[in-house]
Image (tube, grey):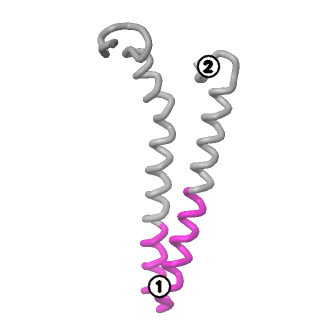
Amino acid sequence: MTSPQEPGEGGPSQFGRVFRDAGPLFGSGIQMAAAIVLMFFVGRWLDERWETAPWLMFVGTALGAAAGLVQFIRTVNQQTSREQRPGGSGS
């Protein structure tokens, strides 16, 4: 069994590469959540201003979810195309 200090299968370089490759996916998940929360509060603010509660809050949340999902899909597609290029994970 190899420990994290020993080079070889699953060693530190492998461990670091996995996190480096997964980093953009973690970031896009946070971006998706931020888009949903931001648009929720924008919709809520507009509802209070124009007295349309709760419709614009729902619309804002849906738009935030759609925008976040589109960005997440773009990031996944970019990551997939990097992995399929000759030479590995985009390095």
- Range of residues picked out in magenta: 39-68
Say what secondary structure mark 2 lies in. loop
Could you tell me the amino acid type at mark 1?
Asp
Q: Is residue 44 left or right of residue 1?
A: right
**Residue 80 placed where, x, y %?**
64, 34
Q: Do the residues labelled 2 and 1 touch (CB within 8 Å)?
A: no
Residue 40 lies within the magenta run: yes
Q: Which residue is drawn at 46% across and 43% down?
A: 27
Residue toward you, 59 or 73: 73
Question: In the picture, which quadrant includes the C terminus?
Answer: top right
Q: Mark 2 points at which residue?
A: 88
**Disc 2 residue crowd, few under 14, some 14–19, many 20+, Cα 10 Å:** few
Q: Distance between the residues labelled 2 and 1?
A: 49 Å
Say what secondary structure mark 1 lies in. helix
Indicate which disc residue 47 carries: 1
Mark 2 vs mark 1, foreground winner is: 2
**Residue 66 placed where, x, y %?**
60, 63
Question: In the picture, which quadrant includes the N terminus?
Answer: top left
Report the residue that reaches farthest toward the top: 7
Q: In this view, does 16 lie to the left or right of 77?
A: left
Residue 60 lies within the magenta run: yes
Residue toward you, 20 or 11: 11
Q: Residue at x 49, y 68 (%)?
A: 39
Q: Residue at x 50, y 38 (%)?
A: 24
**Residue 40 placed where, x, y %?**
45, 71
Could you tell me the amino acid type at mark 2?
Gly
How many circles with numbers are drawn on the protein? Answer: 2
